[in-house]
Amino acid sequence: MSEIYRDEEVLGKAYDSRLMQRLLSYLKPYRRLVVANVFILIASSLAQLAGPYLTKIAIDQHISAGDSAGLFRIILMFLATIAVGFTLQYFQVYMMEYVGQRAMYDLRMQIFSHAQGLDLKFFDKNPVGRILTRITSDVQALNEMFTSGVVAIFGDIFTLLGIVIIMLILDWRLALVVFSVLPLLIVATSIFRKKVRQSYRDVRLQTARINAYSQEHIAGVTVVQSFVAEGKTFYGYDGINGELRNAHLRSVFYYAVFFPVVEFIGAISLGLIIGYGGAQILAGTLTLGALVAFIQYADRFYQPIRDLSEKYNILQSAMASSERIFKLIDTPSNIINPSQPRTFGKIKGRIEFRNLNFQYEEDNPVLNDINLQIEAGEKIAIVGATGAGKTSLISLLCRFYEYEKGDILVDDISLKEIDEKTLRKNIALVLQDVFLFSGDINRNIRLDSEHISLEAVRRAAIEIGADRFISKLEGGYGYQLSERGANLSVGQRQLIAFARALAFDPAILILDEATSSVDTETELLIRDALRKLLADRTSIVIAHRLSTIKGVDRIVVLHKGRIREVGTHSQLLAQKGIYYRLYQLQYKDQEVLVPDD
């Protein structure tokens, strides 16, 4: 079994008091509505229980006596109980749906907020699809429990107890006849519970598999089509889809068998009631009205039992979902903010890496003994082969990961003494793979920041050169982007990322392979803009194309997680070391992106 599906397979207990107590805490803000709902449910149950008893009175006291006036009053009372029951049921359902939706709103906000604050190490190990499942289907399972489970279970139990008490009061011997079939019902329910539990496990597992398979192959549809692999992909999907279909059909089969079995047991009970009750009527120890009432109560006796079987499935789903949700919520971030962070004004931008060591996995170091000082306003380039540790270095600077050995200082203050949000507000990161959100261009540049006006967005775009193509789009800065900005070219997306960085005016700018996907025409367009973007701020440029970094103040060469060379472009070429060999592998006549001062 693949590890990715383990959480979906494990169900845990059908009922866990610890989880239930925690779930009910989400109802505390709405406890008055919940309490009111319980009283409404009790009143609704009483209204339902009154019907058969009114039938008994009508037959024994009015029909048998020929009292039409009394019968008419009973009929009015019967209609009144139906109307009251309908009204109470309406308010009960509406109020619980309202409470359930509000509680789920609070829970979804908590999950989303917590997930946004987790470090990147968590996302390296947990697929995004799994987190989305927590926010959507798992939360929906809890919503069903709140709206159709907790209070409804209480109502079913109350109705069941009410029916038992009334039948015992009417005739305890006839009540025992009804209860004589309970062992059959208990056995049937036990078998059903075990079968449905396994069936639910299979459905959950196959649903997780088909969701993962669909997401992966739809996202990679370009590769599938390029290699004409549609047939094999369809074959794989057909297999998983067939397993899901069979799992659902097994679940349907168990329900299709269980409910007729309950009806059959109810029919046996009804036959016993008629036989024993008829004999009592003939003996003069039971009235006809009481027998009719007993038949109606016996029929209603099995309805809450059927409902409780349904609620068991809902409860089991909720327990499994809540366990997964709380596991996510309880996952702490490895980035520990200081309890009393250091306060300072605007960051100047001096950076120091001091004896820094880092590893993603134990006994697999990525950075070893990194010592580097970057002065405020200095432009530094970091180069090296793939896997040298370039991106890891800047990820630590942005505090996306926690380092254990060594330290990183900004303006002579350890990052572990600085609030992570304060730090990141002073750093702008432009990646090779630009991420744009659905929405207009204005939102994608300012990221909903209240401190950046539309005019500031325009100024940043004009300085970068993005305004040239934005002004030609329909709606200009209000132009709606599709998912990840797919309706823009790679170069246009990169220009918007540069405009975003300039609009936030950071003290530290990081370009991580930010120009590797830019074509020659776009390079020429942003060359002068980059001079403005890099001016008067500490800049770290990571690039594979070495010709784009000739104009930086210093070049740092990383090799296998260690700093091997530091110097200017000409100095490093003269050394004929690692940088020289890297440079020889590339064209020497490429356009210089960061111009010499």
Image (cartoon, rainbow, N blue to C red):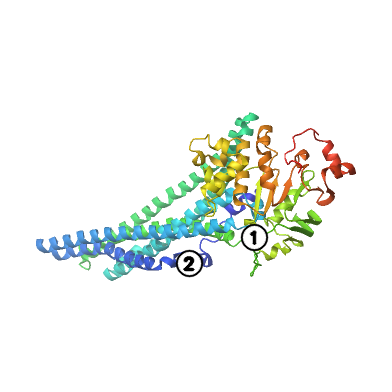
Q: Relative to the observer, which residue lies in front, 405 or 140?
A: 405
Residue drawn at point x = 71 percent, y = 43 percent: 513
Q: Secondary structure at mark 1?
A: loop
Question: Looking at the rendered structure, which numbered label has been put on residue 25?
Answer: 2
Image-quadrant location for residue 423: bottom right
- Residue type at tag 1: Lys
- For marks 1 and 2, the one nearer the N-term is 2
Q: Position of residue 394 (x, y in %)?
A: 72, 52
Between marks 1 and 2 in the image, the one whose residue lies nearer the viewer: 1
Separation of residues labelled 1 and 2 (CA atoms): 42 Å
Question: Looking at the rendered structure, which numbered label has been put on residue 346?
Answer: 1
Residue at the extreme front of the image, as rendered: 597
Q: Secondary structure at mark 2?
A: helix
Residue drawn at point x = 65 percent, y = 67 percent: 341
Residue 231 visible in the displayed image: yes
Q: Relative to the observer, which residue lies in front, 542 or 95?
A: 542
> Horizontal placement of 311 versus 510: left or right?
left
* Other residues around mark 2 within 10 Å, as few (<14) / some (14–19) / many (≥20): few
Q: Position of residue 138 (x, y in %)?
A: 51, 54
